[in-house]
């Protein structure tokens, strides 16, 4: 029996030990599963907190949108925790309409009568400056056909009584004619504005002699002059500096997602500062001076606008490095459109701006 006892006891002990170990393993596994479950329940909110916030900005494929292209290409939005998509439009009016409808969160483009109509309904709000016509920056040119020039149209002041090609009534071109008249003592009723719906149609009418004059972007006007189709009479920035474009969003975005708007603005201002350093300097003769990062930033804008860098360089607009707006001109724009019957007379011009994001 003394020999048999150990033989009988060992399997029993083994079974006892195995059962004990199995229970311990099961308890450990259960504890691990509970811990994993708790961790997995916590992960979605943590991951969500770290995930980039999505936003979409609408713009036109023009050099005036340069700081937006720079902020996207150089990752400034991403550094602020924003995943920003860029949506390009073909006309200025499409952009605020898309903001008002909620299709995009931000817009940057020229200011039109249509924009202010949407602002009067509480659909869009200006939060910062975009580009502007400024002395020494050849962005928009007054041009006369050769026939009109020979007949006496020698200066921008001579446009009174002439036929001028524009894109549409209520456009930035319409306003440029209006402020030129304010300076030289005539109204838009004393010129014949010919709305042609697009720049290519304006060029065709100009070349065909259907109009006497046109206000055209720098790249277009320089090409017309080089082709011998007409004469450049001067530049809008030298005659009548004004706030051409702005960055805007919806009042709902400001109210419900202010931190995201602040992030967007920080990235935008970083790009503005780089744009300013690279492109805004002029020498004593008024000629452009290439600043830090000139070639890199020019290449970014050229890629975004699908133009050759040397063409882009000829029409780079002025941008304020701190995104400050020409408030008095915005007020004048609203009053002008009201006088033209394009905007509700009850609109308070200052209600279309929230400049707290630029400290203005």
Image: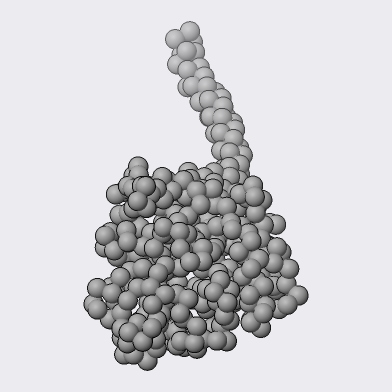
| Horizontal side, residue 206 vs residue 82: left or right | left
Q: Who is closer to the viewer here, 103 or 64?
A: 64
Eyeballing the image, is 265 above or below 107?
above
Q: Position of residue 274 (x, y in %)?
A: 42, 46
| Horizontal side, residue 308 vs residue 139: left or right | left
| Horizontal side, residue 64 vs residue 346: left or right | left
Q: Who is closer to the viewer here, 119 or 25?
A: 119
Q: Position of residue 42 (x, y in %)?
A: 61, 42
The residue lying at 28 percent from left, 74 percent from top is 225
The residue lying at 64 percent from left, 47 percent from top is 359
Residue 169 in view of the camera? yes
Q: Quadrant of residue 144?
A: bottom left
**Residue situated furthest front in the rendering:** 152
Q: Position of residue 202 (x, y in %)?
A: 38, 83
The residue lying at 59 percent from left, 58 percent from top is 326
Eyeballing the image, is 214 above or below 44?
below
Residue 78 in view of the camera? no
**Residue situated furthest right in the rendering:** 346
**Residue situated furthest left in the rendering:** 227
Q: Quadrant of residue 229?
A: bottom left
The residue lying at 54 percent from left, 83 percent from top is 169
Q: Who is closer to the viewer here, 223 or 121?
A: 223
């Amino acid at each position: 029996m003394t020999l048999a006892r150990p033989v009988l006891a060992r399997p029993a002990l083994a079974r006892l030990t195995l059962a004990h170990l199995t229970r311990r393993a099961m308890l450990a596994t259960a504890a691990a599963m509970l811990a994993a479950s708790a961790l997995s329940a916590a992960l979605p909110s943590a991951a969500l907190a770290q995930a980039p916030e999505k936003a979409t900005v609408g713009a036109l494929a023009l050099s005036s949108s340069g700081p937006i292209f720079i902020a996207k290409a150089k990752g400034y939005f991403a550094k602020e925790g924003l995943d920003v998509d860029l949506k390009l439009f073909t006309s200025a009016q499409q952009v605020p309409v898309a903001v008002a409808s909620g299709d995009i969160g931000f817009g940057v483009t020229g200011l039109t009568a249509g924009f202010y109509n949407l602002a009067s309904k509480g659909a869009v709000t200006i939060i910062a400056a975009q580009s502007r016509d400024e002395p020494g920056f050849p962005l928009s040119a007054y041009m006369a056909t050769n026939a009109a020039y020979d007949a006496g149209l020698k200066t921008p002041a001579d446009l009174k009584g002439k036929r001028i090609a524009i894109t549409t009534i209520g456009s930035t071109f319409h306003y440029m004619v209006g402020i030129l008249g304010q300076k030289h003592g005539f109204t838009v009723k004393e010129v014949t504005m010919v709305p042609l719906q697009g720049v290519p149609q304006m060029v065709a009418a100009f070349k065909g002699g259907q109009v006497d004059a046109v206000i055209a972007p720098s790249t277009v006007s320089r090409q017309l002059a080089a082709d011998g189709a007409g004469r450049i009479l001067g530049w809008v920035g030298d005659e009548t500096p004004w706030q051409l474009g702005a960055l805007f969003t919806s009042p709902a975005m400001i109210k419900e997602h202010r931190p995201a708007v602040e992030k967007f603005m920080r990235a935008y201002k970083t790009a503005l500062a780089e744009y300013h350093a690279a492109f805004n300097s002029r020498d004593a003769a008024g000629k452009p001076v290439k600043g830090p990062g000139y070639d890199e930033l020019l290449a970014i804008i050229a890629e975004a606008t699908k133009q050759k860098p040397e063409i882009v360089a000829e029409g780079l607009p002025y941008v304020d490095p701190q995104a400050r707006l020409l408030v008095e001109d915005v007020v004048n724009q609203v009053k002008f459109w009201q006088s033209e019957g394009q905007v509700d007379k009850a609109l308070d011009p200052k209600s279309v701006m929230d400049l707290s994001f630029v400290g203005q």
